[in-house]
Amino acid sequence: MANEYYSFRHEDSEFCYDSENLRLMKGATEIELEKTPREVLAHLLKNPGKLIRYEDLKAKIWQQPYMDNASVYNAINKINKALRDAQPGADFIRTRKGEGVVFKAKVEVLPGPPPHGPPSPTDSNVDGAKSAAHHSRASSESGVDLGGAIKAAAESRASSIADRLCAEIQEIVAAHRDRESAIRSIRLHLETELEDTEEWLASSRQGAEEQKTKKRDTQGEVAAFAFSNIFYARELADAKRKKRALSMMLGELQSISSGPLGSHEIAPELSRLARFYLR
């Protein structure tokens, strides 16, 4: 199937979705969103203005039409949060209780990548890649630590993941009146996050392996290879950190469920672990 690019707007801000690579962009900036929510968003963008029933989403994305709706709610919440973090006030998805969801913004199918989007790291012929090769050589000559740059990028991304997890846990606790239901909802949320992270980790490992087979004959190909290596190294580092953080948080949640900790103490305790392992 041919790659499709979907464009939608909020006020003066334009978002673009690359259906083949499952990439969500605001202008030239990629928006962090995990694999399952990206797949849900792709399905909504292909059917703007239409009611997509929960059963259809569960069959399409999870291949389990009779599972409960918790995973769908979780994915929709992540999409909404990512879009609102990128553009405060953005409101693209309408939920109809017990029925499904509607992507209510106007969606345009673009004939190709948006002009402001970043060049693909695999495109060895673009001028940007040639320029990148020049800067890569200059950085090498100036003694810049490439490994340090990758580490810095991973730390920055990990911090934003921790911020999001903490905010979501606080929202879950605030939405529940009793301690037990809050713990159940947090556990389901963290387990879903862990499943998405396993997929993210597997996808990053596959991408890193495929990258090893790419040609590196021309200046542009060398640059593309270098930047793709940085990208996959960052993705792997972030996914591993997040997986460890979620595993520790689930273990702590088990201890909390059988201990005396009050509802108001759950979010701070789990947030402490998230920030420690995603620092």
Image (cartoon, rainbow, N blue to C red):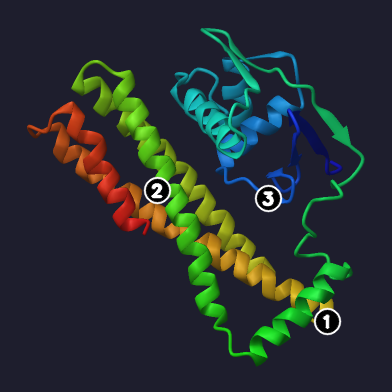
User: Does the rendering let one see residue 13?
Assistant: yes
Residue 219 — which label? Answer: 1
Among the two numbered marks 3 and 1 on one chain, the one whose residue lies closer to the N terminus: 3
Report the side of 67 relative to 224 (left or right).
left
Q: CA distance from mark 2 to mark 3?
A: 20 Å
Look at mark 2 in the image and give the residue it sits on.
Answer: 162
What amino acid type is highlighted by mark number 3?
Answer: Thr
| Label 1: which secondary element | helix
Which residue is situated farthest in the left direction here?
A: 260
Residue 5 — which label? Answer: none
* Residue 221 picture location, percent across and down: 80, 76
Specify the quadrant of the image occupied by residue 52: top right
| Front in this rendered view, residue 217 or 32 | 32
| Label 2: which secondary element | helix
Residue displayed at 52% across by 48% down: 199
| Front in this rendered view, residue 247 or 140 | 140
* Residue 90 picture location, percent across and down: 63, 27
Report the side of 69 relative to 110 (left or right).
left
Among the two numbered marks 2 and 3 on one chain, the one whose residue lies closer to the N terminus: 3
Report the side of 186 relative to 150 (left or right).
left
Q: Residues within 10 Å of mark 2 (few under 14, many from 20)?
A: many
Look at mark 3 in the image and give the residue it sits on.
Answer: 29
Specify the quadrant of the image occupied by residue 45: top right
Of labels 2 and 1, the one closer to you: 2
